[in-house]
């Protein structure tokens, strides 16, 4: 189809929906819905990959330390990763009754065998 054919289809469609601004609004809305859906799908896929990566793996703490929030880690203690989102990692510290805790991934890498 030539450029004129596409132009005719666009103007006809714009006329049906109430003008070019309405058509633009509809296109932007549909694009936003599709974009949000893709972001949601990507987020869920990342969660699935992360769960498979850390499923039932226990990490061992290599030094006695305390994080910025006052959470104490003891050498030889263990933790399990429940969720991770960027640098924030949700862990279950074994033997601690107040689980779970959010901890920095970088911090965990410095005190344990967490990768």
Image (tube, rainbow, N blue to C red):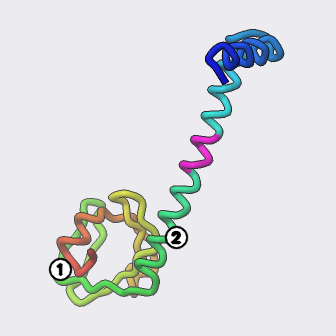
Mark 2 falls on what kind of element?
Answer: helix
On the image, the x and y values in percent for residue 22 come to: 72, 15
Which region shows up in magenta? 34-39
In depth, the one of 105 and 6 nearer the eye is 6
Which mark sits nearer the N-terminus, 1 or 2? 2
Separation (CA) of disc 1 from disc 2:
32 Å
The residue lying at 73 percent from left, 13 percent from top is: 8
Mark 1 falls on what kind of element?
Answer: loop
On the image, the x and y values in percent for residue 102 come to: 39, 64
**The C terminus, quarter of image:** bottom left
Vertical arrangement, residue 96 with respect to residue 76, above or below: above
Question: Which residue in the rendered view is the most extreme toward the bottom?
Answer: 76
**Most common secondary structure along the magenta stretch:** helix
Query: In the visual, does 55 lie left or right of 62?
Result: right
The residue lying at 27 percent from left, 77 percent from top is: 114
Q: Which mark is residue 48?
A: 2
Residue 90 highlighted magenta (yes or no): no
**The N terminus, quarter of image:** top right
In depth, the one of 101 and 56 nearer the eye is 56
Q: Residues within 10 Å of mark 2 (few under 14, many from 20)?
A: few
The residue lying at 78 percent from left, 14 percent from top is: 12
Can you identify the residue that label 1 sits on?
A: 64
Label 1 vs label 2, nearer the camera: 2
On the image, the x and y values in percent for residue 13 come to: 77, 18
């Amino acid at each position: 189809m030539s450029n004129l054919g596409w132009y005719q289809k666009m103007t006809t469609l714009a006329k049906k929906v109430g003008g070019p601004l309405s058509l633009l609004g509809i296109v932007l809305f549909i694009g936003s819905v599709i974009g949000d859906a893709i972001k949601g799908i990507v987020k869920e896929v990342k969660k699935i990959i992360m769960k498979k990566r850390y499923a039932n793996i226990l990490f061992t703490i290599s030094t006695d330390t305390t994080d910025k929030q006052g959470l104490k880690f003891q050498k030889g203690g263990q933790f399990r990763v429940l969720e991770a989102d960027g640098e924030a990692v949700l862990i279950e510290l074994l033997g601690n009754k107040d689980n779970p805790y959010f901890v920095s991934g970088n911090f965990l890498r410095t005190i344990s065998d967490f990768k």
